[in-house]
Image: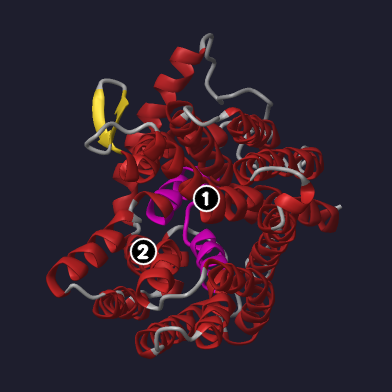
Protein backbone atom coordinates (compact mmCIF):
# COMPACT_ATOMS: atom_id res chain seq x y z
CA UNK A 1 0.00 0.00 0.00
CA UNK A 2 2.73 2.49 0.98
CA UNK A 3 4.71 1.87 -2.23
CA UNK A 4 1.58 2.52 -4.31
CA UNK A 5 0.91 5.73 -2.43
CA UNK A 6 4.47 6.90 -3.03
CA UNK A 7 4.22 6.16 -6.73
CA UNK A 8 0.96 8.10 -6.85
CA UNK A 9 2.65 11.00 -5.06
CA UNK A 10 5.53 11.04 -7.56
CA UNK A 11 3.08 11.45 -10.41
CA UNK A 12 1.87 14.83 -9.22
CA UNK A 13 5.33 16.21 -9.89
CA UNK A 14 5.17 14.43 -13.26
CA UNK A 15 1.83 16.14 -13.93
CA UNK A 16 2.37 19.72 -12.80
CA UNK A 17 5.88 20.15 -14.23
CA UNK A 18 4.26 20.67 -17.62
CA UNK A 19 3.17 24.06 -16.30
CA UNK A 20 6.67 24.96 -15.09
CA UNK A 21 8.52 23.77 -18.20
CA UNK A 22 6.18 24.54 -21.11
CA UNK A 23 4.24 27.54 -19.80
CA UNK A 24 6.54 29.45 -17.43
CA UNK A 25 10.02 28.55 -18.65
CA UNK A 26 9.55 28.60 -22.43
CA UNK A 27 6.36 29.78 -24.10
CA UNK A 28 4.06 32.13 -22.20
CA UNK A 29 6.49 34.96 -21.41
CA UNK A 30 7.55 35.67 -25.00
CA UNK A 31 4.02 35.10 -26.35
CA UNK A 32 2.28 37.38 -23.83
CA UNK A 33 4.94 40.05 -24.34
CA UNK A 34 4.56 39.88 -28.12
CA UNK A 35 0.77 40.27 -28.17
CA UNK A 36 1.06 43.10 -25.63
CA UNK A 37 3.55 44.87 -27.89
CA UNK A 38 1.16 44.52 -30.83
CA UNK A 39 -1.59 46.19 -28.76
CA UNK A 40 0.63 48.95 -27.32
CA UNK A 41 0.15 52.66 -27.89
CA UNK A 42 2.76 55.01 -29.35
CA UNK A 43 4.59 55.06 -26.01
CA UNK A 44 4.78 51.29 -25.85
CA UNK A 45 2.15 51.02 -23.08
CA UNK A 46 -0.96 48.89 -22.74
CA UNK A 47 -4.06 49.51 -20.63
CA UNK A 48 -4.46 47.09 -17.72
CA UNK A 49 -7.34 47.68 -15.29
CA UNK A 50 -7.06 51.45 -15.55
CA UNK A 51 -3.26 51.54 -15.47
CA UNK A 52 -0.80 52.20 -18.28
CA UNK A 53 1.74 49.39 -18.17
CA UNK A 54 4.78 49.04 -20.46
CA UNK A 55 4.09 46.14 -22.80
CA UNK A 56 7.45 44.54 -22.06
CA UNK A 57 6.70 44.50 -18.34
CA UNK A 58 3.25 42.89 -18.57
CA UNK A 59 4.51 39.36 -18.01
CA UNK A 60 6.72 40.16 -14.98
CA UNK A 61 3.91 42.30 -13.57
CA UNK A 62 1.53 39.34 -13.83
CA UNK A 63 4.08 37.05 -12.16
CA UNK A 64 4.59 39.62 -9.40
CA UNK A 65 0.82 39.91 -8.87
CA UNK A 66 0.56 36.13 -8.52
CA UNK A 67 3.42 36.15 -5.99
CA UNK A 68 1.65 38.77 -3.87
CA UNK A 69 -1.51 36.64 -3.84
CA UNK A 70 0.56 33.58 -2.93
CA UNK A 71 2.17 35.29 0.05
CA UNK A 72 -1.26 35.98 1.55
CA UNK A 73 -2.97 32.71 0.61
CA UNK A 74 -0.40 29.92 1.05
CA UNK A 75 -0.41 29.89 4.87
CA UNK A 76 -4.22 29.84 4.83
CA UNK A 77 -4.21 27.00 2.30
CA UNK A 78 -1.85 25.11 4.61
CA UNK A 79 -4.04 25.72 7.65
CA UNK A 80 -7.10 24.42 5.80
CA UNK A 81 -5.18 21.38 4.53
CA UNK A 82 -4.06 20.56 8.08
CA UNK A 83 -7.74 20.32 9.04
CA UNK A 84 -8.76 18.05 6.19
CA UNK A 85 -8.41 14.38 6.89
CA UNK A 86 -8.45 13.63 3.15
CA UNK A 87 -6.04 16.16 1.68
CA UNK A 88 -6.33 14.59 -1.79
CA UNK A 89 -9.64 16.42 -2.23
CA UNK A 90 -7.96 19.79 -1.77
CA UNK A 91 -5.07 18.73 -4.00
CA UNK A 92 -7.61 17.94 -6.72
CA UNK A 93 -9.36 21.30 -6.33
CA UNK A 94 -6.17 23.26 -6.89
CA UNK A 95 -4.76 20.92 -9.54
CA UNK A 96 -7.85 21.19 -11.73
CA UNK A 97 -8.34 24.90 -11.11
CA UNK A 98 -4.78 25.46 -12.32
CA UNK A 99 -4.93 23.04 -15.23
CA UNK A 100 -8.23 24.47 -16.52
CA UNK A 101 -6.84 28.01 -16.34
CA UNK A 102 -3.77 26.80 -18.24
CA UNK A 103 -5.88 25.16 -20.94
CA UNK A 104 -7.88 28.40 -21.23
CA UNK A 105 -4.66 30.17 -22.31
CA UNK A 106 -5.42 28.67 -25.72
CA UNK A 107 -8.14 31.33 -25.99
CA UNK A 108 -5.61 34.17 -25.67
CA UNK A 109 -5.54 35.57 -29.19
CA UNK A 110 -3.73 38.53 -30.80
CA UNK A 111 -5.51 41.14 -28.63
CA UNK A 112 -6.01 39.05 -25.51
CA UNK A 113 -3.16 40.24 -23.32
CA UNK A 114 -5.50 41.10 -20.40
CA UNK A 115 -7.08 37.64 -20.46
CA UNK A 116 -3.62 36.11 -20.67
CA UNK A 117 -2.38 38.06 -17.64
CA UNK A 118 -5.45 37.17 -15.55
CA UNK A 119 -5.23 33.47 -16.44
CA UNK A 120 -1.52 33.45 -15.66
CA UNK A 121 -2.11 34.87 -12.18
CA UNK A 122 -4.91 32.39 -11.49
CA UNK A 123 -2.98 29.38 -12.81
CA UNK A 124 0.23 30.27 -10.98
CA UNK A 125 -1.56 30.75 -7.64
CA UNK A 126 -3.42 27.45 -8.04
CA UNK A 127 -0.16 25.73 -9.03
CA UNK A 128 1.63 26.96 -5.90
CA UNK A 129 -1.32 26.16 -3.63
CA UNK A 130 -1.41 22.60 -4.96
CA UNK A 131 2.31 22.25 -4.18
CA UNK A 132 1.66 23.30 -0.56
CA UNK A 133 -0.86 20.48 -0.19
CA UNK A 134 1.30 18.03 -2.17
CA UNK A 135 4.37 18.63 0.01
CA UNK A 136 2.34 18.06 3.18
CA UNK A 137 1.89 14.41 2.16
CA UNK A 138 5.63 13.73 2.43
CA UNK A 139 5.78 13.00 6.19
CA UNK A 140 2.73 10.70 5.82
CA UNK A 141 4.23 8.48 3.13
CA UNK A 142 7.91 8.41 4.15
CA UNK A 143 9.66 7.90 7.47
CA UNK A 144 12.59 10.06 8.63
CA UNK A 145 15.18 7.83 6.93
CA UNK A 146 13.26 7.61 3.66
CA UNK A 147 12.31 11.18 2.89
CA UNK A 148 15.45 12.21 1.03
CA UNK A 149 15.03 9.36 -1.43
CA UNK A 150 11.26 9.83 -1.80
CA UNK A 151 11.51 13.60 -2.23
CA UNK A 152 14.32 13.23 -4.79
CA UNK A 153 12.34 10.70 -6.81
CA UNK A 154 9.43 13.14 -6.90
CA UNK A 155 11.65 15.87 -8.32
CA UNK A 156 13.15 13.44 -10.83
CA UNK A 157 9.66 12.43 -12.00
CA UNK A 158 8.83 16.11 -12.34
CA UNK A 159 11.75 16.92 -14.59
CA UNK A 160 11.03 13.80 -16.65
CA UNK A 161 7.37 14.65 -17.16
CA UNK A 162 8.05 18.30 -17.93
CA UNK A 163 10.84 17.35 -20.32
CA UNK A 164 8.84 14.78 -22.28
CA UNK A 165 5.99 17.19 -23.02
CA UNK A 166 8.41 20.04 -23.71
CA UNK A 167 10.14 17.99 -26.42
CA UNK A 168 6.87 17.50 -28.29
CA UNK A 169 5.92 21.15 -27.91
CA UNK A 170 9.31 22.39 -29.11
CA UNK A 171 9.11 20.12 -32.15
CA UNK A 172 5.66 21.51 -32.92
CA UNK A 173 6.88 25.09 -32.49
CA UNK A 174 10.12 24.78 -34.44
CA UNK A 175 8.46 22.79 -37.25
CA UNK A 176 5.13 24.63 -37.18
CA UNK A 177 5.08 25.31 -40.91
CA UNK A 178 5.56 21.66 -41.77
CA UNK A 179 2.62 20.80 -39.50
CA UNK A 180 0.48 23.38 -41.28
CA UNK A 181 0.05 25.77 -38.35
CA UNK A 182 1.29 29.28 -37.65
CA UNK A 183 3.86 29.72 -34.87
CA UNK A 184 1.44 31.65 -32.65
CA UNK A 185 -1.05 28.82 -33.06
CA UNK A 186 1.68 26.33 -32.16
CA UNK A 187 2.33 28.29 -28.95
CA UNK A 188 -1.36 28.24 -28.03
CA UNK A 189 -1.56 24.50 -28.71
CA UNK A 190 1.49 24.01 -26.49
CA UNK A 191 -0.15 25.97 -23.66
CA UNK A 192 -3.32 23.91 -24.07
CA UNK A 193 -1.32 20.67 -23.99
CA UNK A 194 0.41 21.71 -20.73
CA UNK A 195 -2.93 22.16 -19.00
CA UNK A 196 -4.29 18.91 -20.44
CA UNK A 197 -1.15 17.01 -19.38
CA UNK A 198 -1.46 18.46 -15.85
CA UNK A 199 -5.14 17.46 -15.64
CA UNK A 200 -4.66 13.97 -17.10
CA UNK A 201 -1.74 12.81 -14.94
CA UNK A 202 -3.21 14.39 -11.78
CA UNK A 203 -5.81 11.63 -11.77
CA UNK A 204 -3.15 9.22 -10.48
CA UNK A 205 -2.13 11.15 -7.32
CA UNK A 206 -5.65 12.33 -6.53
CA UNK A 207 -7.03 8.80 -6.56
CA UNK A 208 -3.89 7.12 -5.23
CA UNK A 209 -3.56 9.42 -2.20
CA UNK A 210 -7.21 9.44 -1.17
CA UNK A 211 -6.58 6.84 1.56
CA UNK A 212 -3.65 8.77 3.04
CA UNK A 213 -5.28 10.26 6.12
CA UNK A 214 -4.11 13.23 8.12
CA UNK A 215 -3.10 11.48 11.38
CA UNK A 216 -3.95 14.52 13.49
CA UNK A 217 -7.69 14.31 12.74
CA UNK A 218 -10.34 11.78 13.59
CA UNK A 219 -13.02 12.66 11.03
CA UNK A 220 -13.40 13.93 7.49
CA UNK A 221 -14.60 17.42 8.35
CA UNK A 222 -12.77 20.57 7.45
CA UNK A 223 -12.00 21.32 11.08
CA UNK A 224 -11.76 19.53 14.40
CA UNK A 225 -13.98 22.30 15.75
CA UNK A 226 -17.67 22.40 14.79
CA UNK A 227 -18.13 24.97 12.04
CA UNK A 228 -21.32 25.75 10.17
CA UNK A 229 -20.04 28.00 7.41
CA UNK A 230 -16.90 28.45 5.36
CA UNK A 231 -16.64 31.97 6.76
CA UNK A 232 -16.36 30.71 10.32
CA UNK A 233 -14.04 27.92 9.19
CA UNK A 234 -11.67 30.35 7.48
CA UNK A 235 -11.87 32.66 10.48
CA UNK A 236 -10.87 29.78 12.75
CA UNK A 237 -7.93 28.95 10.48
CA UNK A 238 -6.75 32.58 10.48
CA UNK A 239 -6.78 32.57 14.26
CA UNK A 240 -4.79 29.34 14.26
CA UNK A 241 -2.27 30.82 11.83
CA UNK A 242 -1.61 33.67 14.24
CA UNK A 243 -1.07 31.16 17.02
CA UNK A 244 1.26 29.09 14.82
CA UNK A 245 3.26 32.22 13.92
CA UNK A 246 3.80 32.91 17.63
CA UNK A 247 4.73 29.29 18.32
CA UNK A 248 7.29 29.29 15.48
CA UNK A 249 9.59 31.38 17.66
CA UNK A 250 10.06 28.26 19.79
CA UNK A 251 11.89 26.65 16.86
CA UNK A 252 14.88 28.96 16.19
CA UNK A 253 16.90 26.32 14.31
CA UNK A 254 14.00 25.65 11.93
CA UNK A 255 13.71 29.39 11.29
CA UNK A 256 17.45 29.58 10.70
CA UNK A 257 17.19 26.82 8.08
CA UNK A 258 14.28 28.63 6.44
CA UNK A 259 16.39 31.81 6.22
CA UNK A 260 19.27 29.82 4.70
CA UNK A 261 16.88 28.27 2.16
CA UNK A 262 15.47 31.70 1.31
CA UNK A 263 18.97 32.93 0.44
CA UNK A 264 20.37 30.09 -1.62
CA UNK A 265 17.05 29.26 -3.26
CA UNK A 266 16.70 32.88 -4.33
CA UNK A 267 20.02 32.45 -6.11
CA UNK A 268 18.71 29.28 -7.75
CA UNK A 269 15.48 30.93 -8.90
CA UNK A 270 17.35 33.94 -10.28
CA UNK A 271 19.70 31.74 -12.30
CA UNK A 272 16.69 29.87 -13.72
CA UNK A 273 14.87 33.11 -14.56
CA UNK A 274 17.78 34.98 -16.18
CA UNK A 275 19.98 32.29 -17.74
CA UNK A 276 18.16 32.52 -21.06
CA UNK A 277 18.54 36.30 -21.13
CA UNK A 278 22.24 35.95 -20.27
CA UNK A 279 22.72 33.48 -23.11
CA UNK A 280 20.89 35.72 -25.58
CA UNK A 281 22.30 39.14 -24.72
CA UNK A 282 25.75 38.40 -23.31
CA UNK A 283 26.71 35.19 -25.10
CA UNK A 284 24.91 36.01 -28.39
CA UNK A 285 23.52 32.48 -28.71
CA UNK A 286 20.79 31.57 -31.16
CA UNK A 287 17.30 30.59 -30.00
CA UNK A 288 17.85 26.97 -31.03
CA UNK A 289 21.07 26.83 -28.97
CA UNK A 290 19.30 28.22 -25.91
CA UNK A 291 16.48 25.70 -26.34
CA UNK A 292 19.08 22.94 -26.52
CA UNK A 293 20.57 24.11 -23.20
CA UNK A 294 17.09 24.11 -21.63
CA UNK A 295 16.66 20.47 -22.62
CA UNK A 296 20.09 19.63 -21.20
CA UNK A 297 19.01 21.10 -17.85
CA UNK A 298 15.67 19.29 -17.95
CA UNK A 299 17.10 15.81 -18.39
CA UNK A 300 20.36 16.06 -16.43
CA UNK A 301 18.18 17.21 -13.53
CA UNK A 302 16.44 13.81 -13.57
CA UNK A 303 19.68 11.94 -12.97
CA UNK A 304 21.03 14.62 -10.65
CA UNK A 305 18.01 14.44 -8.35
CA UNK A 306 18.28 10.65 -8.10
CA UNK A 307 22.05 10.71 -7.59
CA UNK A 308 21.98 13.38 -4.88
CA UNK A 309 19.08 11.61 -3.17
CA UNK A 310 21.13 8.40 -3.07
CA UNK A 311 24.17 10.29 -1.79
CA UNK A 312 22.08 11.92 0.95
CA UNK A 313 21.23 8.46 2.25
CA UNK A 314 24.96 7.83 2.68
CA UNK A 315 26.26 11.10 4.14
CA UNK A 316 23.17 13.14 5.07
CA UNK A 317 21.05 15.66 3.19
CA UNK A 318 22.51 18.80 4.79
CA UNK A 319 26.03 17.83 3.67
CA UNK A 320 24.82 17.09 0.15
CA UNK A 321 22.99 20.42 -0.04
CA UNK A 322 26.14 22.23 1.08
CA UNK A 323 28.13 20.38 -1.59
CA UNK A 324 25.55 21.29 -4.23
CA UNK A 325 25.87 24.97 -3.31
CA UNK A 326 29.61 24.74 -3.96
CA UNK A 327 28.79 23.32 -7.41
CA UNK A 328 26.35 26.22 -8.01
CA UNK A 329 29.16 28.69 -7.29
CA UNK A 330 31.53 26.85 -9.63
CA UNK A 331 28.87 26.85 -12.37
CA UNK A 332 28.38 30.62 -12.06
CA UNK A 333 32.12 31.26 -12.22
CA UNK A 334 32.36 29.09 -15.36
CA UNK A 335 29.39 30.96 -16.86
CA UNK A 336 31.21 34.23 -16.15
CA UNK A 337 34.22 33.07 -18.17
CA UNK A 338 32.21 31.41 -20.97
CA UNK A 339 33.02 33.30 -24.19
CA UNK A 340 30.35 34.68 -26.48
CA UNK A 341 29.26 32.42 -29.31
CA UNK A 342 30.21 29.20 -27.47
CA UNK A 343 27.05 27.04 -27.32
CA UNK A 344 28.90 23.87 -26.30
CA UNK A 345 30.48 25.60 -23.30
CA UNK A 346 27.09 27.03 -22.31
CA UNK A 347 25.50 23.58 -22.65
CA UNK A 348 28.19 22.20 -20.34
CA UNK A 349 27.32 24.84 -17.74
CA UNK A 350 23.64 23.96 -18.22
CA UNK A 351 24.44 20.31 -17.55
CA UNK A 352 26.29 21.19 -14.36
CA UNK A 353 23.38 23.34 -13.18
CA UNK A 354 20.86 20.66 -14.12
CA UNK A 355 22.72 18.03 -12.11
CA UNK A 356 22.43 19.99 -8.84
CA UNK A 357 19.14 21.77 -9.58
CA UNK A 358 16.69 19.03 -8.67
CA UNK A 359 18.73 17.54 -5.85
CA UNK A 360 19.35 20.79 -3.98
CA UNK A 361 15.64 21.61 -4.01
CA UNK A 362 14.38 18.07 -3.32
CA UNK A 363 16.70 17.61 -0.35
CA UNK A 364 15.77 21.04 1.01
CA UNK A 365 12.14 19.92 0.98
CA UNK A 366 12.83 16.63 2.74
CA UNK A 367 15.15 18.23 5.30
CA UNK A 368 12.55 20.89 6.11
CA UNK A 369 9.92 18.18 6.63
CA UNK A 370 12.03 16.80 9.48
CA UNK A 371 12.07 20.16 11.28
CA UNK A 372 8.37 21.08 11.40
CA UNK A 373 5.71 20.11 13.95
CA UNK A 374 3.62 17.05 13.19
CA UNK A 375 0.03 17.79 12.19
CA UNK A 376 0.99 21.31 11.04
CA UNK A 377 2.99 20.25 7.99
CA UNK A 378 0.85 22.06 5.43
CA UNK A 379 0.97 25.35 7.34
CA UNK A 380 4.75 25.23 7.50
CA UNK A 381 5.02 24.11 3.89
CA UNK A 382 2.91 27.14 3.02
CA UNK A 383 5.67 29.29 4.51
CA UNK A 384 8.24 27.12 2.73
CA UNK A 385 6.56 27.82 -0.61
CA UNK A 386 6.57 31.55 0.14
CA UNK A 387 10.32 31.30 0.71
CA UNK A 388 10.54 29.24 -2.48
CA UNK A 389 8.48 31.51 -4.74
CA UNK A 390 7.44 34.66 -2.92
CA UNK A 391 10.92 36.08 -2.42
CA UNK A 392 12.30 35.26 -5.88
CA UNK A 393 12.29 38.97 -6.73
CA UNK A 394 15.23 39.68 -4.41
CA UNK A 395 17.86 38.00 -6.57
CA UNK A 396 16.50 39.45 -9.79
CA UNK A 397 16.45 42.91 -8.20
CA UNK A 398 20.09 42.56 -7.10
CA UNK A 399 20.97 41.30 -10.58
CA UNK A 400 19.25 44.32 -12.10
CA UNK A 401 21.10 46.69 -9.79
CA UNK A 402 24.36 45.04 -10.83
CA UNK A 403 23.57 45.65 -14.49
CA UNK A 404 22.64 49.28 -13.77
CA UNK A 405 25.92 49.89 -11.92
CA UNK A 406 28.28 47.96 -14.19
CA UNK A 407 26.43 47.71 -17.49
CA UNK A 408 27.51 44.07 -17.65
CA UNK A 409 25.57 40.83 -17.36
CA UNK A 410 28.84 39.03 -16.64
CA UNK A 411 29.62 41.08 -13.57
CA UNK A 412 26.02 40.79 -12.38
CA UNK A 413 26.03 37.02 -12.60
CA UNK A 414 28.97 36.92 -10.20
CA UNK A 415 26.90 38.90 -7.69
CA UNK A 416 24.60 35.89 -7.39
CA UNK A 417 27.47 33.93 -5.86
CA UNK A 418 26.82 35.89 -2.66
CA UNK A 419 23.37 34.27 -2.28
CA UNK A 420 24.85 30.76 -2.40
CA UNK A 421 27.73 31.61 -0.05
CA UNK A 422 25.56 33.34 2.57
CA UNK A 423 22.86 30.67 2.35
CA UNK A 424 25.47 27.93 2.66
CA UNK A 425 27.11 29.56 5.67
CA UNK A 426 23.76 29.94 7.42
CA UNK A 427 22.87 26.31 6.65
CA UNK A 428 26.26 25.21 7.98
CA UNK A 429 25.52 27.13 11.19
CA UNK A 430 22.09 25.48 11.58
CA UNK A 431 21.94 22.67 14.13
CA UNK A 432 19.76 20.25 12.21
CA UNK A 433 19.42 17.68 14.98
CA UNK A 434 18.50 20.40 17.47
CA UNK A 435 15.85 21.64 15.03
CA UNK A 436 14.36 18.15 14.78
CA UNK A 437 14.41 17.77 18.56
CA UNK A 438 12.77 21.18 19.07
CA UNK A 439 9.63 20.05 17.24
CA UNK A 440 9.61 16.58 18.83
CA UNK A 441 10.21 14.53 15.68
CA UNK A 442 12.22 11.28 15.61
CA UNK A 443 15.84 11.64 14.56
CA UNK A 444 16.90 10.18 11.17
CA UNK A 445 20.15 8.26 10.94
CA UNK A 446 21.76 10.86 8.65
CA UNK A 447 21.19 14.60 8.44
Our reading of the magenta stretch's main secondary structure is: helix
**Residue placed under numbered mark 1 in the picture:** 24
Q: Earlier in the sequence, mark 1 or mark 2?
A: 1
Residue 244 vs residue 175, the one in the foreground:
175
How far apart, in angstroms, are the residues tagged by discs 1 and 2?
17 Å
**Residue 114 picture location, percent across and down:** 42, 27
**Residue 443 picture location, percent across and down:** 56, 71
**Residue 432 picture location, percent across and down:** 43, 73
Name the image quarter holding residue 71.
top left
Name the residue rendered at 47%, 27% in the picture. Answer: 111
Name the residue rendered at 47%, 61% in the picture. Answer: 371
Which numbered disc covers residue 152? none
- Relative vertical location of residue 8 with respect to residue 430 in this rendering, above or below: above
Name the image quarter holding residue 445.
bottom right
Give the residues drawn in magenta, as a range. 360-388
Name the residue rendered at 40%, 36% in the picture. Answer: 38
**Residue placed under numbered mark 2 in the picture:** 266
Amino acid sequence: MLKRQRRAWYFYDFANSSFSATVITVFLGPYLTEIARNSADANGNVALFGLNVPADSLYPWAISASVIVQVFTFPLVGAIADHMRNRAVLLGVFAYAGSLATMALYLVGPNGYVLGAVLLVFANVAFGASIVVYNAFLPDIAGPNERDEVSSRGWAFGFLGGGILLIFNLVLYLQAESFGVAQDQAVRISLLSAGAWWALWSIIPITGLRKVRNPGLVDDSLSELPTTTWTSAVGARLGELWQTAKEARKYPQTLKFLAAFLLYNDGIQTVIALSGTYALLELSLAESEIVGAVMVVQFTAVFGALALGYLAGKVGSSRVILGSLVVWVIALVIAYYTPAGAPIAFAAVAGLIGFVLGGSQALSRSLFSQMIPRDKEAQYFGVFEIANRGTAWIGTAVFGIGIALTGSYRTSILVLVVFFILGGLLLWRTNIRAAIAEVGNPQPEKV
